[in-house]
Amino acid sequence: MLSKTCEYGIRATIFIALQSILGKRTSLKYISKEIDSPEAFTAKILQKLVKEKIIESIKGANGGFEISQPKLKSTKLSEIVYAIDGYDIRNRCMLGLPHCSPDNPCSVHNKYKPVRDELITLFTDTTIEEMALGIKDKSAILK
Amino acid sequence: MLSKTCEYGIRATIFIALQSILGKRTSLKYISKEIDSPEAFTAKILQKLVKEKIIESIKGANGGFEISQPKLKSTKLSEIVYAIDGYDIRNRCMLGLPHCSPDNPCSVHNKYKPVRDELITLFTDTTIEEMALGIKDKSAILK
DNA sequence: CTAAAATCGGACAAAATAGTCTTAATTTTA
DNA sequence: TAAAATTAAGACTATTTTGTCCGATTTTAG
């Protein structure tokens, strides 16, 4: 479904969001410990999320990663997914057919499309803040 | 979502089913041409499906692959998916958390689980015959 | 000013997935 | 019975994904 890169990216973003809600800036080392991900690999993913302006980085001692309050509320899960895994998931055929579409459906298109659409709705409806608050109030886990 | 191996496997099975409905046995060469897949790789996948008793193979000249009439109706898409990609998809967490469950949910579990359950229902409800008939009546494509 | 604490960027390495090739085994047909 | 047509099996290769390493850069604190 999602690449591991994307999974780590979402988990890292949720954790940075949580810390930002708590008024803290957090470091790569702490992030990868708290989301149980390889540190060097996570660094690469965070670089990408910084370039895509989903998170912010501050260099130097006392540096780290954070997310501004407005962005916590406005950024959707979909933005992380698309930034890392691309937009392909929105149209991808379950059987891998390159030209599958409503006009030219594969054998499962009509059953699969509604499920896929719900998934896209999930992505575009879910905010980073919402996911982080689940961690904050301990109703959800992150590793 | 599904591995390429699995996509090829499903497409090959649909094509073999179509030919079986038409009363024909079909060869690897023809299958891979008709579903637009690499021949040698497809051979490997078909071997697996034979071992799993989803399709039947007949060796020698005039040999090939076929599916019996009863199996066309009784075999579900889920059996192909599980044979090739395994059962993991049924419980897999969207964020890749190994212990994510209803009791221990990740930040998106409650939104994702219903979608995942629909997908599983799609798999277990869809028969091979049903998929092949879409090709037969030209309401669906296979490559 | 300098040392320490961080991120950044590019090259490299390992593992998983996708795909090929060659030879053997089996069956049909001329 | 020999040749041709076909699948089976295993070793090999290629590509993609996942992950590491190291040196450069930036910033803070002492």
Image: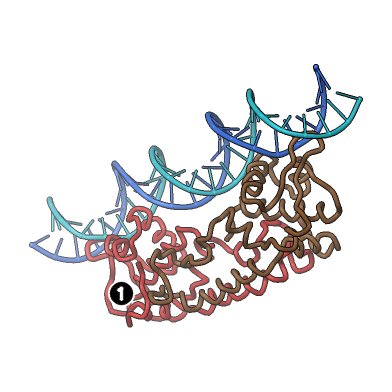
Chain colours: A brown, B red, C blue, D cyan
Q: Horizontal placement of D25 versus C23: left or right?
A: right
Determine the residue positioned at 43% across, 67% down.
B10
* CA neighbours of label 1 inside 10 A, class few (<14), some (14 to 19), many (20+): some
Q: Give whichever of A74, A91 is nearer the camera.
A: A74
Q: Is residue A38 above or below residue A131?
A: above
Residue type at tag 1: Gln
Determine the residue positioned at 44% across, 68% down.
B53
Q: How many marks?
A: 1
Q: Give whichever of B139, B74 is nearer the camera.
A: B139
Could you tell me residue B18's position as x and y percent? 33, 76
Could you tell me residue B99's position as x and y percent? 74, 59
Q: Is residue B15 above or below residue A79?
A: below
Q: Give whichever of A123, A52 is nearer the camera.
A: A52
Locate residue A57: give its quadrant. Answer: top right
Locate residue A30: give its quadrant. Answer: top right
Q: Horizontal placement of B71 versus B2: left or right?
A: left
Q: Is residue D21 above or below residue A99?
A: above
Q: Horizontal placement of A128 versus A5: left or right?
A: right
Q: Quadrant of the N terminus of chain A?
A: bottom right
Could you tell me residue A43's position as x and y percent? 67, 41
The residue that label 1 is drawn on is: B19
Could you tell me residue C19's position as x and y percent? 38, 50
